Amino acid sequence: DTAVSQTPKYLVTQMGNDKSIKCEQNLGHDTMYWYKQDSKKFLKIMFSYNNKELIINETVPNRFSPKSPDKAHLNLHINSLELGDSAVYFCASSLDRDQETQYFGPGTRLLVL
Amino acid sequence: QKEVEQNSGPLSVPEGAIASLNCTYSDRGSQSFFWYRQYSGKSPELIMSIYSNGDKEDGRFTAQLNKASQYVSLLIRDSQPSDSATYLCAVRGTGGFKTIFGAGTRLFVKA
């Protein structure tokens, strides 16, 4: 059983398109995260939700909008995709917001052409 | 100054040697420190966490923390080719629930 899953695994799209990435965890965790990892392997936090409440909202363009329909799911919608959005996007979860051990999903490799 | 700094490498060591990976951080009030391993094309996985000054050992891995120097390191004894990966240092600072990751050090273990 996959603990943290993401779909799709690969996403190739044109500039200007809108796309969504979905994340689900079956660990019973309260807290979920979105990270962006660029070509230099730098892993940067974007958002975090705890029990459907937004607790971390880093300085990212407002073209990025997270949505958490329940505590097991955290989706990421990106409007008007740009070349610089090309990266690997990782979803992660932790038991709660005070538990620092994070479990990462397999990543979604986004390429914007 | 970056919040968490690591030498990007690559660090190349022969099989059986000790690999030493280093990390410095800027938030003096940080309390929680982690080492994640990331194989090429895969997701990060936690291998060590450390919260107190000194050494913490787990199998072939030893994490070392010196809060006064704002320095954390990871030693890998008897390095194996399967240890070849990028090692990410991560620090939970005083600014909320955020964990800050370094850019990672690439390690190559030569057979």
Image: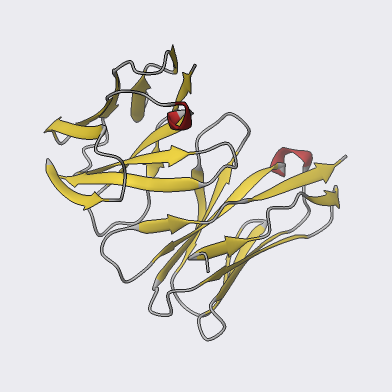
Q: Give the percent coordinates (x, y) of residue B105.
A: 66, 52
Residue closest to the eye, A65 or B99? A65
| Residue A89 in the image: above or below residue A81 | below
Colour mode? Answer: secondary structure
Q: Residue at x 57, y 42 (%)?
A: A41
**Side of A52 relative to B56 (left or right):** left
**Side of B74 relative to A81 (left or right):** right
Quadrant containing the C terminus of chain B is: top right
Residue closest to the eye, A100 or A112? A112
Q: Give the percent coordinates (x, y) of residue A96.
A: 22, 51
The reply to whether residue A51 is in sight is: no
Q: Residue at x 50, y 81 (%)?
A: B67
Task: Name the outermost residue toward the bottom.
Answer: B68
Report the number of numbered marks: 0
Q: Give the percent coordinates (x, y) of residue B109.
A: 80, 45
The reply to whether residue B58 is in sight is: yes
| Residue B106 in the image: above or below residue B73 | above
Q: Give the percent coordinates (x, y) of residue A35.
A: 38, 41
Q: Residue at x 38, y 79 (%)?
A: B29
Residue closest to the eye, B96 or A38? A38
